[in-house]
């Protein structure tokens, strides 16, 4: 998938994949939503509106009410690339979210996921 395709992909398209990944490992949609809200600052209602509007990933992160400053503490590898080394801001935000969902699916406690 090219960089352009990822950015223009709707959040509504990847969201069910995140939920499925979490649920397969005994986690919940509620936890996925909590992670997305923690990362972006969207309220639950705002998140649901963004999903309904089929907003693309680039816009979703660009319009996020308050990107969590603790997201800079997210380290590790997603798709063979260290998230802390990604220089393109939107791609880094997408990979931060991917990494958090991976951690959820691997059974990490929410406090650890939220870097508390």
Image (spheres, rainbow, N blue to C red):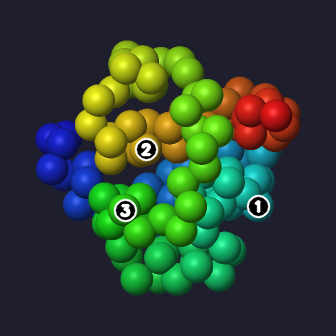
CA neighbours of label 1 inside 10 A, class few (<14), some (14 to 19), many (20+): few
> Is residue 67 in view from this perspective?
yes
What percent of the width, then of the height, locates residue 66?
A: 56, 61
In which quadrant is the N terminus drawn?
A: top left
**Nearer the camera: disc 1 or disc 3:** 3
100 or 24: nearer the viewer = 100
Q: Secondary structure at mark 2?
A: helix
The residue closer to the viewer here, 108 or 87, is 87
In the figure, is residue 50 to the left or right of 71? left
Is residue 69 shown above or below 78? below
Disc 1, SS: helix
Task: Report the disc number at residue 93.
Answer: 2
Q: Residue at x 48, y 65 (%)?
A: 64
Q: Nearer the viewer, residue 65 or 75?
A: 65
Q: Residue at x 50, y 38 (%)?
A: 96
Q: Residue at x 23, y 60 (%)?
A: 8
Q: Secondary structure at mark 3?
A: helix
């Amino acid at each position: 998938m090219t960089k352009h395709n990822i950015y223009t992909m709707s959040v509504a398209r990847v969201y069910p994949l995140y939920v499925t990944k979490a649920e397969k490992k005994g986690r919940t949609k509620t936890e996925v939503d909590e992670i997305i809200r923690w990362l972006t600052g969207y309220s639950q209602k705002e998140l649901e509106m963004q999903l309904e509007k089929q907003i693309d990933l680039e816009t979703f992160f660009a319009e996020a009410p308050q990107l969590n400053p603790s997201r800079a503490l997210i380290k590790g590898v997603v798709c063979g690339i260290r998230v802390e080394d990604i220089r393109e801001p939107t791609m880094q935000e997408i990979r931060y979210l991917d990494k958090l969902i991976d951690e959820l699916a691997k059974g990490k406690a929410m406090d650890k996921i939220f870097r508390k």
